[in-house]
Amino acid sequence: MMYRNDFASGRSCWKPSLVAMLLTLLLGFSLSAMVQAAQDTGGESVAQRIAPVGQVWVEGEPAPETEPVAEVATEEAPVYVAPRPTRKDYPDIGVSSRAVVWILAQMHLFFGALVLAVPLFVLIIELVGQSTGDERYDDMAHEFMKISLTGFSITAIFGGTLALALFVLYPDFMGYMMRVFGAQWIVYAGLFFLESFFLYTYYYGWNAMRYGNLKWLHLTLGLLLNGAGMTIMVMANSWATFMMAPSGVNEVGAIVGNIWEVMKGPLWNPVNLHRFIANIAFGGAVVGAYAAFKFLSTRDPAKRAHYDWMGYTSNFIALLAFLPLPFAGYWLMAEIYAYSQQMGITAMGGILAWLFIVQAVLIGTILLAANYYLWAGMSRTEGSSRYQWLIKYIALILVVCFLIWVTPHTLLLSATEIAALGGSHHHYLGPLGIMPAKNIAVNLMLIVTFLSFQLYRRSDKVATVSWAPAGNALLVAIYVVAIVNVIFLGVYFGYFTNTVYKVGSSVAQVASTLVVIIAGIVIDSLMFRGARTLPSHWGRIPDRAQYALFALPIAFTWLMGLMGYVRSSVKTHWHVYTVMQDNSPDNFIPTIGYAGNMITIVTVLFLLFVLFMFWIANLGSSRQPVPVRAAAMEGVA
Amino acid sequence: MSVLIKTVGFSLGLTLVFTGVANMLPQVEGDAPVDVKVDLSALTMDDFVAMGEDLFNNKGTCTLCHKPAPLGRAPDVQGTNMVAITTERLADERYQGKATDAASYILESMLEPSAYVVAGWGKKGSDDAESPMPAVDKPPIQLSDIEVDAIIAYLQAKDGNEVTVALPSPDAAAEVAKSDAAPGGAGAAPAPAASGEEGLAKYTCTACHALDSDDTLVGPGLGSVGARLSEGEIRQSIIDPNAVIAEGFPAAMPGDFAEKMTVRELEMIVKLLAEKKQ
């Protein structure tokens, strides 16, 4: 039985929605006023701020009598500089403090990313269900929420444990951060109450607010849930970006700006955007693995069709978010270079440069898996045969570009090896190791991945508009021009001009890729309006294709861990770059191998906790059958 | 169950592939700068030049940017005769600095990189008026005066030029590669202070303490410190500042004055402060 959401009925229900929104706004203003008040006074009274100088006396001797000093009134707040802890100020717990914090922080971030992303695309899916009247979207959105619900608790548990670990293991650093961010911590904690309120009313109110205007109230709750979640994320991001590029403090770390000046450092918004997009890709990939597992676990055609569709939607979300991610990453790196060239080169051309070979392997895995899933998914539709001849060429471009991307530039070689190679760099492969070649490779990989996606979307449709041939010709022309442009810009500016132009040309390369993606979406959406639809069979996909949906979250998780390693390591031996030095025993950048082992530990831990989360989600809907003996007794009675 | 085993096995296998790749790559650790004790009485100019080269390649992080074209993001200092090119740079009409010779030009380039920016190497949009290079005596690099001199010596000596900077004297400083050395001009170590006032200036006490009032800067004001503390207490708070910290203030005062100050300097400062009773 299909239900159509009735927007016209239940008109009185707009009132609760309005009231809820007003209450939220009021609460927001109150919190903002609290922060402002705390800033105005520095969080302390005038009497507290004019702290008297304490008495000093030599240990073992009685305290001397001194003349009382009149309190000196001043309106100047004391300036707190960053502490300079020595090695003995870091507690030794027998294992590496950094390793403990690393694991806890990464687990907190994994689950935080998941539970921030899922409500975001759940809201969009719910909105699609509302606008199309197709209840399958609504049910799927609800199921996504169900499987991630435990994730909120797990995030909070790891967050709390991380905070405790930091206070115990890095007391001076945390004391300084508390001092710098002040009342922002209270607001941060307060937002968790808000988020919990919206989360539980959103999830448990799903069926109670399913139709009519109540549905809009439900959507509003979802929006507020996302608003609270996003605010939490950007606040937490400001701590990380403050550590990388401090603002609102002077060169000795004394606070000279208000909380807003402390938060809005040069890297804050690039990190906000990067994490926002990456979270969506990550969340889509994780719930895709759930759908794949459920698909493989059942032989029921109806359930396989449902989970196939769910897996496809998850992959769609992950891929759509993933495509612009390198551009957000590019912006972040450009801002890092602008803030400190030294920091940028430490990441890209210094000790951490090898890390980007691993990154290439991971992103290559993601693109190959996502493409493979799309190609395998074409078997669902009968119209896909029109495009299948293109797949081998796409695969060829992907593999060649992947190999260029993983080509290292500088190798650690013995004298014999250098002699055999004919120099420190290979005569032919050497030029493939530098960034221009890799920029060409990554842009081409993104362009052909979008082509795979576009072909998949077209495979169950036949355009009926009269200008379809012209539209196709235009699209082909755009692809050809963009590919030629990407290659020309990379080769000419990368190898025949100096570094400044090399960096500048990569912006034009990215623009070419974006033009393909935007033009492709616009032309197809116009061309396939009112198109004839060909039969599509959900559930008709090879089992092996589901493993691509497992490869995606594993590669995403590992990639997030790797990027966490580089983000933290570019600070080198500083807790807060240039302001508070890290004098702990772990104040060195670990090797890529050590980091790889740590990332694997957290990835496996995350996998186990995700399995637990899925198991809990299904436990709630299972019911123990009545024991045979009791049933028999009932029958006798 | 077989689906669970297969999918978990696949996921673990893939994870191990990534771990394997990470472990196959060259393993390099990025060490933080460490304090190195150098016997200055036995230091030769060759040692000093070698020290400069090491600082240039490691702690100074100069080679991150100063590489041969096309890899460099700054002029190729190691591939250029810096002494020979100084004349050309100083004669450039864009030059607005105060250097008069190669040593002072290299010193100025390190401490005030924007004083003169080589054409084409300025910050984007600055029209070569601003350098992207950080001052090497400030965080995060924080080279000491002697380390800066060692780099100048290296840049002069590498092309066979005469080294014009003086070797640090044994009395100048015991620690050469000290990461948290106080910034200041390059050259020989400062002479002992002749009075309490000079001592306070030498150890930059006024950066954090108001001397003529009790106003709070970073640390408490010292205008009436003599009324609050005895000479012994003042002495104690200088040589072991973290023993007792004034309420409401962080443990921010350097704890190494006992190593840096001469006994005479300490006593002059203590006496001067003890007289401050307003």
Image: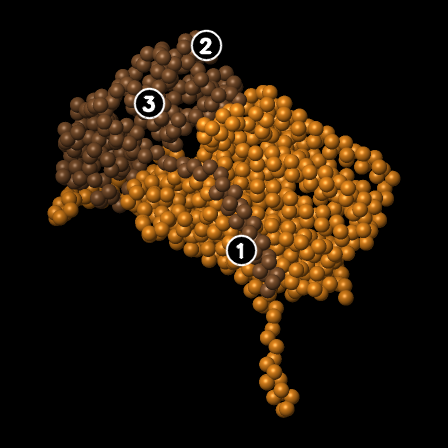
Query: What is the count of numbered marks?
Result: 3
- The answer to whether the residue labelled 2 contacts the one labelled 1, judged by CB atoms less than 8 Å apart, is no
Q: CA distance from mark 2 to mark 1?
A: 63 Å
Q: Residue at x 53, y 45 (%)?
A: B18
The reply, left or right, for residue A317 in relation to residue B128 is: right
Tell which subunit mark 1 falls on: A
Q: Which label's residue is closer to the chain start, 2 or 3?
A: 3
Q: Which residue is mark 2?
A: B92
- Residue A509 is situated, as x and y percent measured from the top left of the image, at 64, 30
Tell which subunit mark 3 falls on: B
Q: Nearer the viewer, mark 3 or mark 1?
A: 3
Q: Nearer the viewer, mark 2 or mark 1?
A: 1
Toward the viewer: A350 or A454? A350
The amino acid pointed to by label 2 is Asp
Q: Residues within 10 Å of mark 3 (few under 14, many from 20)?
A: some
Question: In the picture, which quadrant includes the C terminus of chain A?
Answer: bottom right
Q: Residues within 10 Å of mark 1 (few under 14, many from 20)?
A: some
Q: Residues within 10 Å of mark 2 (few under 14, many from 20)?
A: few
- Residue A37 is situated, as x and y percent measured from the top left of the image, at 43, 46
Q: Which residue is mark 1?
A: A607
Q: Which residue is mark 3?
A: B50
- State the hue of chain B: brown
Furthest-bottom residue in this view? A637
Q: Nearer the viewer, mark 2 or mark 3?
A: 3
- State the hue of chain A: orange
The amino acid pointed to by label 3 is Ala
Q: Is residue B56 above or below residue A224?
A: above
